[in-house]
Image (cartoon, helix red, strand yellow):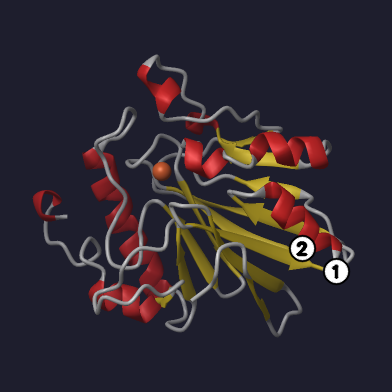
Amino acid sequence: MLGNGEFDVQVGEDGIEVWVTQMGSMMNMNTAWIDRESGTVAIVDPFDSERWVKALATEGLHPTHLLYTHSHRDHTAGFPEMLRLVPDVEVWGHHEAIHKSFLGRFVFGNISLTDEWTHEANSTIEWSAGGINLSITHSPGHAPGHCTIHGHGVYHAGDLLFTASSGRVDLPGSDPTAQWKSILFARDLLRTLPSDWRLIPGHRYDWIDGSTPDWVSVSEVLAHNYALNARELDSF
Ligand SMILES: [Fe+2]
């Protein structure tokens, strides 16, 4: 199990590195895809930016892209510091993730996107930078504009799915019906991925046996995640 701010590094056969860490009291999981050849570093929802920048600097790297699954405060916590440390970083997220309702002020953090995804719910687009090729699936419900991001052996689920459960749908901007549709779409998508790919959840919560793994495999999540195995909206 990863300690707070500890990094797991795995290198794929294609040379793309995947760094995964867990940070903060809510055990936020961050994933980064790194292509050393082009110097590309794309980080999902960086929580503690100083820690990220320091760890990357020891390897002669720095963040080039931030990819946001959604804009809840705990996922955008690292944004101001990242912008201070790396002012020219590209900031990507879905257009609908920027939420401006009154109640939303307590739930959503302030980020400014340099580039927006605008695709429909439950559709996937391809995103590339350097040698990194990712699929971005718009999966709203937990939060507007929520996206999952997968590629190079990893499916980063954000708060759509945790290892054993799914994200809450009782917050301002949440939509239980949309979440259910996103879960059904994710189930079909996960079935197309290699079974040994890792599902990285947005938060590290308990698994079905009471352990708290940093991730589970695609085959494990398909077999045991209760939302992916629910039969109808009411039971997820
Ligand atoms: Fe969230």
Determine the residue positioned at 82% across, 36% down: 87
At numbered mark 2, what does the secondary structure look like: helix, strand or loop? Answer: helix
Residue 6 lies, in percent from the top left, at 62, 68
Whether residue 95 is situated above or below residue 225 in the rendered picture: above
The image's mark for residue 72 is: none
Q: Decide: few, some or many residues near mark 1? Use Cα within 10 Å; few <14, some 14-19, many ≥20.
A: few
Residue 182 lies, in percent from the top left, at 32, 50
Q: Decide: few, some or many residues near mark 2? Use Cα within 10 Å; few <14, some 14-19, many ≥20.
A: some
Whether residue 110 is situated above or below residue 59 in the rendered picture: above
The quadrant of the picture showing ligand 1 is top left
Of 45 and 231, nearer the camera is: 45
Determine the residue positioned at 54% across, 31% down: 95
Residue 207 lies, in percent from the top left, at 30, 72
Kindly identify the amino acid type of the residue bearing the numbered disc 2: Ala
Q: Quadrant of the C terminus?
A: bottom left
* Alpha carbon distance from label 2 to label 1: 7 Å
Whether residue 216 is situated above or below residue 157 in the rendered picture: below
* Residue 86 visible in the picture: no
* Residue 192 visible in the picture: yes
Of 112 and 150, nearer the camera is: 112
Kindly identify the amino acid type of the residue bearing the numbered disc 1: Glu
At numbered mark 1, what does the secondary structure look like: helix, strand or loop? Answer: loop
Please report contact status of discs 2 and 1: CB closer than 8 Å, yes or no: yes
Q: Identify the residue position indicated by label 1 in the image.
A: 59
Q: Identify the residue position indicated by label 2 in the image.
A: 55
Describe residue 211's horizontal placement relative to residue 90 as left or right. left
Of 31 and 4, nearer the camera is: 4
Determine the residue positioned at 31% across, 68% down: 206
* Quadrant hosting residue 101: top left
Determine the residue positioned at 49% across, 42% down: 74
